[in-house]
């Protein structure tokens, strides 16, 4: 707990700003958030995360980190902010912290792998169906336009898929 800072963010508050060179991550205790990038004025949602999960920019794992994503609270969020470098230092000295660290890294790999597989092998309807199964909380806590971007479809396509269900 000594390396964490407890913070509360309101919906639409920026939790982490792009362009950072730190190794900040957070665990969501309550609420949900998204990480996104803006390209030519268009927002692309890269990650959606809810309670109990680690959130941050994978660029923070680089030797010289540079965050390319903004992370915003979608709902009121209670988070524990921490520095990944400090967590790694503690993990190398403490087996229980190493287990915590490795479990979080495994979960991140699973999520990234799933995200890649879904875009390679699934159509829009299948990605929507899978999201409902995988984490139905997002449908209650996230605006449709953010879900559409996260699923790689236009808001109109998302609306059509959603209302077919």
Image: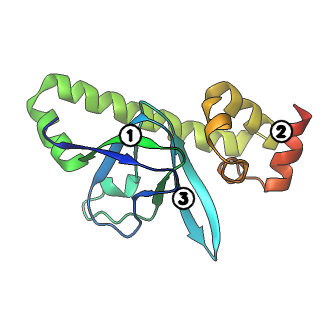
User: Which residue in the structure is indicated by mark 3?
Assistant: 36
Task: Specify the label residue 154 is tagged with.
Answer: none
Circles 3, 2 touching at the beta carbon (< 8 Å): no
Q: Position of residue 95 (x, y in %)?
A: 15, 24
Q: Taking 160 as reference, is 66 above or below it?
A: below
In depth, the one of 147 and 102 nearer the eye is 147
User: Which residue in the structure is indicated by mark 2?
Assistant: 162
Dot 3: element:
strand
Q: Residues within 10 Å of mark 3 (few under 14, many from 20)?
A: many
Say which label, 3 or 2, has the lower sequence index: 3
Q: Nearer the viewer, mark 1 or mark 2?
A: 1
Q: Position of residue 11 (x, y in %)?
A: 51, 50
Q: Residues within 10 Å of mark 1 (few under 14, many from 20)?
A: many
In depth, the one of 128 and 121 nearer the eye is 128
| Image-based side of 67 in relation to 21, left or right | right
User: Which residue in the structure is indicated by mark 1?
Assistant: 78
Circles 1, 2 touching at the beta carbon (< 8 Å): no
Identify the residue at horizontal 12%, vertical 37% (top origin): 90
Q: Residues within 10 Å of mark 2 (few under 14, many from 20)?
A: few
């Amino acid at each position: 707990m000594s390396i964490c800072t407890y913070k509360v963010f309101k919906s639409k508050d920026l939790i982490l700003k792009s362009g950072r060179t730190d190794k900040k991550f957070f665990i969501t205790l309550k609420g949900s958030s998204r990480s996104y990038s803006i390209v030519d004025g268009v927002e692309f949602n890269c990650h959606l995360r809810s309670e109990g999960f680690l959130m941050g920019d994978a660029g923070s794992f680089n030797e010289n980190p540079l965050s390319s994503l903004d992370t915003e609270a979608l709902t009121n969020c209670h988070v524990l902010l921490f520095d990944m470098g400090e967590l790694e230092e503690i993990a190398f000295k403490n087996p229980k912290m190493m287990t915590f660290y490795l479990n979080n890294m495994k979960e991140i790999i699973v999520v990234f792998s799933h995200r890649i597989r879904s875009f390679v092998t699934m159509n829009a309807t299948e990605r929507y169906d899978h999201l409902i199964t995988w984490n139905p909380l997002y449908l209650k806590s996230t605006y449709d336009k953010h879900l559409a971007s996260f699923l790689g479809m236009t808001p109109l396509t998302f609306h059509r898929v959603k209302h077919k269900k």
